[in-house]
Every structure is written in C-alpha cells, then in structure tokens.
Image (spheres, rainbow, N blue to C red):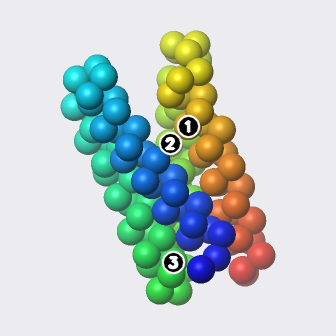
Amino acid sequence: MNSSIIAALAYGILAIIGGVIGYRQANSQVSLISGSISGLLLIVAAYFQFQGQTWASILAVGVTAVLVAFFAFRLAKTRKFMPAGLMILLGTLALAVMVNQFVSFR
C-alpha cells in the first residue's frame, strides 16, 4: 500500500470524524452530511487506488483540494484555528503526499 492510499484513507476518516464532532457540538447537520460525503469519497478513492485505478488518485486529490480551500475560507472567516486550521494543515500534508505519489507514478 503506497503513501497516497494511506493519506486518502486517513484524511477521509478524519473528515468523517470531524463531521460527527461538528454535529454533536453545534447540532450542524451540514457538518455531518458534508463530512460524511467527503470522507466516504476519500475512502472510496483509497480503495480504488489500492485496486490500481488511476482516476481514484485524481478523485482523492480533487476532494482534498476542495476541503483545504473550504477550510481556508472558514479559517479566514472565523479566525479560529480549530477545526479549520488543523484541517488545512493535515489536508495540505495529505495533498502533498498524494500529488507527489501521483507525479512520481506517471
């Protein structure tokens, strides 16, 4: 299993956990739904990457990039590090791993 698969899987799980925490703390159904959808997309992408599908790497990079951009806007709006800043840091790290693996694979 390569590092891109691990990064997609870990960030997907983190997105789901973050959505659940957002729902429990703020009763935000939007957090639960968006966290679950984006997390499941990343987990599915990790599964298909493991199966050797190139499109899954593109999906994982796209979902992660959208999440990083979303959390950057959220951090700019709220100016609170948690959870947006943490998700930006971890998402950027995951994105760097995914892109590096994708570029070196090609």
Q: In which quarter of the image is the N terminus?
A: bottom right
**Taking the image as drawn, is residue 10 in sight?**
yes
* N-terminal label among 2 and 1: 2
Please state the horizontal and vertical placement of residue 93, each as a whole percent of the image. Answer: 68, 49
Name the image quarter holding residue 15.
Answer: top left
Q: Is residue 6 above or below residue 36?
A: below
The structure residue drawn at horizontal position 35% and vertical position 58%, both measured from the top left corner, is: 40
**Which residue is disc 2 drawn over?**
67
Q: Which of marks 2 and 1 is in front?
A: 1
**Taking the image as drawn, is residue 72 in sight?**
no
| Marks 1 and 3 close (CB-CB < 8 Å) | no
Task: Please tell me how crowded label 1 is: few (under 14), some (14-19), or many (20+) other residues with Cα within 10 Å.
Answer: many
Residue 63 numbered mark, or none: none
| Marks 2 and 1 close (CB-CB < 8 Å) | yes
Name the image quarter holding residue 54.
Answer: bottom right
Q: What element carries label 2?
A: helix
Q: What residue type is labelled 1?
A: Met
**Which residue is disc 1 drawn over?**
87
Distance in Å between CA atoms under marks 1 and 3: 22 Å
Residue 49 numbered mark, or none: 3
Q: Is mark 1 on a helix, strand or loop?
A: helix
The structure residue drawn at horizontal position 60% and vertical position 45%, both measured from the top left corner, is: 91
